[in-house]
Image (spheres, rainbow, N blue to C red):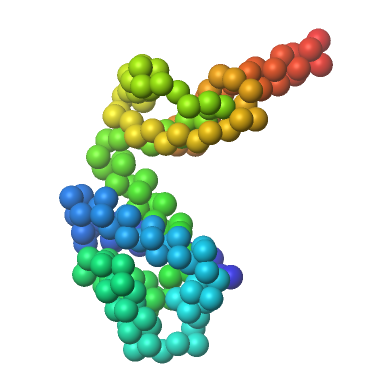
């Protein structure tokens, strides 16, 4: 599979076309297409195969747009990606669109890994702490990870904060080995 250059450029083009107000809905619609591509390899082949003509791709995307009740801008964007032979990079493009959208809204996405479900009071405390840490509003995504044993692990962009028991035991092990 060939690597598509300019993923960020494609993401910026889409955000410019739909605007900040349309971005959440557009990201959701494009994510639905990515989900279908990941779930069904035949569908992915249908979307990215160079065997189909531009007209056949237009009809496929028009059908998909009607079935998913897609906004016209999103369907047009998918046709543009198909004509540019960049649909193969749609998962990376959608991630880039989401990241750029959060950047433009001055928000950060934080992935919170815990072994158990946390209560609302702790969640609000965590949001306040993360706002002070990042200087931005935050969107939390919770992931249950029983392997952590206890504590919490946060991912803010590419930075990891590990306050889990497993992580702390790993640090202790490293210190003991080094002496």
Please indicate whether residue 162 sits to the left or right of residue 118 in the image: right
Q: Is residue 101 above or below residue 66?
A: above
Number of numbered callouts drawn: 0
| Front-most of residues 160 and 5 | 160
Picture residue at 53% right of the left edge, 76% below the top? 42
Please indicate whether residue 43 sits to the left or right of residue 171 in the image: left
Residue 73 locus on image (x, y percent): 22, 67
Residue 173 locus on image (x, y percent): 76, 17
Q: Is residue 133 visible?
A: no
Picture residue at 43% right of the left edge, 70% below the top? 87
Please indicate whether residue 1 sits to the left or right of residue 8 in the image: right
Picture residue at 48% right of the left edge, 27% below the top? 117
| Front-most of residues 98 and 115 | 115
Q: Is residue 15 above or below residue 70?
A: above
Q: Name the residue furthest top.
A: 179
Residue 49 locus on image (x, y percent): 50, 80
Picture residue at 45% right of the left edge, 65% below the top? 36
Please indicate whether residue 153 sits to the left or right of residue 77 in the image: right
| Front-most of residues 27 and 151 | 151
Q: Quadrant of the C terminus?
A: top right
Q: Is residue 107 above or below residue 130?
A: below
Q: Quadrant of the N terminus?
A: bottom right
Residue 30 locus on image (x, y percent): 35, 61
Q: Is residue 173 visible?
A: yes
| Front-most of residues 10 and 53 | 53
């Amino acid at each position: 599979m060939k690597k598509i250059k300019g993923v960020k450029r494609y993401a910026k083009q889409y955000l410019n076309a739909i605007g900040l107000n349309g971005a959440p809905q557009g990201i959701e619609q494009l994510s639905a297409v990515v989900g279908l591509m990941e779930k069904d390899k035949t569908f992915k082949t249908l979307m990215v195969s160079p065997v189909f003509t531009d007209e056949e791709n237009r009809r496929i995307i028009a059908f998909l747009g009607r079935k998913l009740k897609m906004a016209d801008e999103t369907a047009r964007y998918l046709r543009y990606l198909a004509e540019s032979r960049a649909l193969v990079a749609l998962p990376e493009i959608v991630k880039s669109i989401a990241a750029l959208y959060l950047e433009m809204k001055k928000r950060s996405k934080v992935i919170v890994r815990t072994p158990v479900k946390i209560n609302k009071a702790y969640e609000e405390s965590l949001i306040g702490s993360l706002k002070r840490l990042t200087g931005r509003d935050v969107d939390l995504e919770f992931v249950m990870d029983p392997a952590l044993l206890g504590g919490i692990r946060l991912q803010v962009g590419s930075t990891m904060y590990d306050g889990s028991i497993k992580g702390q035991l790993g640090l202790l092990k490293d210190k003991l080995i080094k002496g």
